[in-house]
Image (cartoon, rainbow, N blue to C red):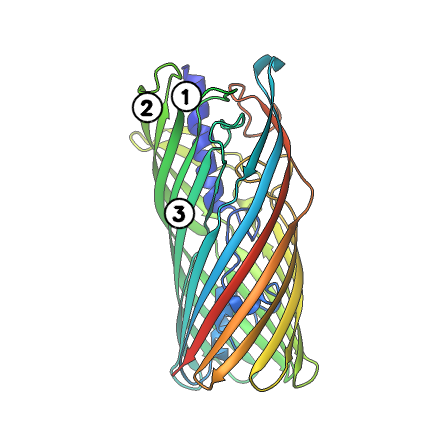
Amino acid sequence: MSWAVKKSVLLTSTAVALSIVATAAHAGGFALREQSSYYQGMSFAGNGTTGDSISGMFWNPATITGAGHGITFEGHNTLIVPNADIEGTNTLAGGAVVAPYDTGDIGSDAFIPSSYTAINVNDQLYLGMSITAPYGLSTKVEDEDWTGAGYNRSSKVFSINVNPIVGWKFNDMISVAFGPQVQYADIRLTNAALSPTLANLPGQTLAGTGIGVGVTAGLTFKPIESTEIGLGYRSAMFTKIGGNLNAALNPAAPTVVSNTDVDTTLVTPDMITLSAKHSITEDIRVLGTFEWTNWSRLKQPRITSAATGAEITSLPFNYNDGFFLALGGEYDFNDKLTLRAGAAYEWSPIDEEIRSARLPDNNRIWVSGGASYEFNKHMSFDLAYTHIFGTDTDINIDASHQDYSATKGVLAGSVDSSVDILSASFRVRF
């Protein structure tokens, strides 16, 4: 295999690794918005304002000042069931072979836990901690030797984020909070070395880990008793990824492999959340959220050799920014039961110019419903369900596409996708 092909193998595998860590399954790509059962029931409308749940800390740490006296702990558990099927053709070099394909469902079900703790030290000072999984999920094609295996066989990512928080309540009108965040990521990705027709081909595996750091900050403002505005910020995360690429160099001799250690510094995007909540009556509230995610900052990170530090290449992400708009409402049915519902529209940072077989992401429509039940003054429960409708999505990896490789051919197709999400949480106050 020539150096140009080996470089293409390295570039494609490393680019995929970074894409999966960086891209926001249910917040655009492979990041996870599902950090709260409570706000899931409103498609995350109002998630930057205070409420019965302290899980708004993920988007706006200042919401910690809405916690009651003493200690509050919440455990959130979410089951995500994605479905994504890609159908199309793979045209090999010279246009000699056009192989149709149907990947089957490439989405993998996932269980996402998160937890939040808040301590009310006094009337003004609040301390807290959130432990979440902002990036994750996995994709795997049912037939690993499908005709587009050069662009995707499987992808798996795990992350955990720890965010201690300090909040200060100046008065009944204004509160602020901030804290550092530390995030660990573990990645494993595979694809074929070339684009197969019907024969098995050796592939390559990229496995890597890294730790990133950043900050969160926010404020809440209540101009009048019935209205609250929240503004939250999650900073970019600077994650140094160290990984190893294990690649077969010759389809005729799959035992001959190349092991290359690679490094890169990945900057994931800033996120700003603006939320509002208004009480129409004592029992009815309307809520809204607008979110901006600075995906366009990714651009072209450098990939270097771990051994020499020399640059191998750069990765053209070229993402757009992502946007999310949600509207929802709550109704206190009685002293124990609260009902909620919401809908949202999400603008993905990925369009057809850069959409890949690993990340067939597009704009989506959210519809959600949920409820909370207060068992007693110390314990309550939340339950929520969401269905996400994917909009019409095409894939066209040709010579103008940033992922294109002549050895893997032109991949064209369409994606049929949807997601079902079921979430439950419990809240304990001491």
Return the x and y of residue 387 as percentages of the image width and height.
62, 57
Q: Tell me the quarter of the image containing the C terminus.
A: bottom left
**Mark 2 to mark 1: distance in Å?**
9 Å
Sequence-earlier tag: 2 or 3: 3
86 in relation to 234, above or below: above
Q: Secondary structure at mark 3?
A: strand
Residue drawn at the location 55% of the way across and 79% of the way down: 174
Which numbered marker is on residue 324?
A: none
- Report the side of 266 relative to 324 (left or right): left
Q: Which part of the image, by quadrant, shows the N terminus? A: top left
Identity, as a three-letter code, of the amino acid under mark 3? Thr
Percent across and percent down for residue 252 are: 38, 14
Amino acid type, label 1: Lys
Circles 2 and 3: CB atoms closer than 8 Å: no
How many other residues sit within 10 Å of disc 2, few (<14), some (14-19) or many (≥20)?
some
| Residue marked by disc 3 | 239
Q: Quadrant of residue 302?
A: top left
Label disc, if present, on residue 6 of the rendered structure: 1
Give the amino acid at mark 2: Ser
Residue 220 figure quarter: bottom right
Task: Work out whether mark 2 precedes mark 1 in sequence or the reverse, and give the earlier one.
Answer: 1
Q: Is residue 298 above or below residue 77?
A: above
| Mark 2: secondary structure | strand
User: Of callouts 1 and 3, which one flags the residue occurring earlier in the amino acid sequence?
Assistant: 1
Q: Check disc 2 and report the residue beneath it.
A: 258
Give the number of the mark in front: 2 or 3. 2
Q: CA distance from mark 2 to mark 3?
A: 25 Å
Q: Are marks 2 and 1 in contact (CB under 8 Å)?
A: yes
Judged by depth in the image, the label closer to the viewer, 1 or 3, is 1
Q: Residue at x 41, y 21 (%)?
A: 6
